[in-house]
Amino acid sequence: GQWSAAIRYFERARSMAEEYGFADLEFHSRTNLADCAVQLRDPVGGLAALSQFRTETPETRPQMSVSANGLNTLSRLHLLAGNLDAARIHAEESSRLARTARLEKIAPNSEAVLALIDVFSGAVDKGFPVLERALLFEKQKSQIELPDYLGMCIDAYEAVGRADKALEYLQELVEWKRKSAEAAVTPLQHEGLTGAIGSETSTSFSDDGLLARAYL
């Protein structure tokens, strides 16, 4: 939840990669910065980070994977900015790449982003079932990307004025963050490192903006 700290590290990585001419690392750093911007609801900062998004056609499967992820992030940023047409174009291209390269981990995310765009476009009957299925599928897997799917559900229900459902998923997201923070602290406790590091980590879920939204 410490997005500001993450942004500082990713910006430093981007700067170093640019200085030494590591194009791939610079692109990854920019994508990570954009991901942070999505979480912070900052389309301006995110779109600036991806202002140099690669336009060449990816040829290898790893390149397609990186490009599909970046396109999903770019789509979310355009959606936050209110540009539904651009959001759909990027999401559809991400979905196409995911199908072409058989990217099993990325395809569900691409479809969920398209479903979120459907909800924002008024096609709620089409969008919500896909979002709910995607969230359930992620819960049955590793749950690494669960916050992203919960975030999409929150945005979708907020968009249609369903504050009750948005709050339900928001509280679930807060609980996920709390458990993640506790899991990160436990190994440190076994090593006797419960000082400043443990203290900082244990409060990482207390994202003021997130909690403010939770109790509106």
Image (cartoon, grey):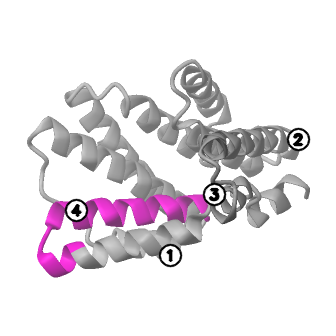
The verdict on residue 43 being magenta is no
Q: Disc 2 designates what residue?
A: 164
The verdict on residue 29 being magenta is yes
Q: Earlier in the sequence, mark 1 or mark 2?
A: 1
User: Residue 80, how many percent across, how many down?
Assistant: 57, 62
Q: Nearer the viewer, residue 149 or 83?
A: 149
In screen coordinates, is 17 left or right of 199? left
Q: Earlier in the sequence, mark 2 or mark 4?
A: 4
The disc label shown at residue 44, or none: 1
SS label for mark 3: loop
Identify residue type, mark 1: Val
Q: Disc 3 designates what residue?
A: 1
Q: Earlier in the sequence, mark 1 or mark 4?
A: 4
Q: Distance between the residues labelled 4 and 3?
A: 23 Å
Residue 82 can be seen, yes or no: no
Q: Name the quarter where the N terminus is drawn.
A: bottom right
Farthest residue to the top: give it.
Answer: 140
Magenta residues, start to end: 17-40
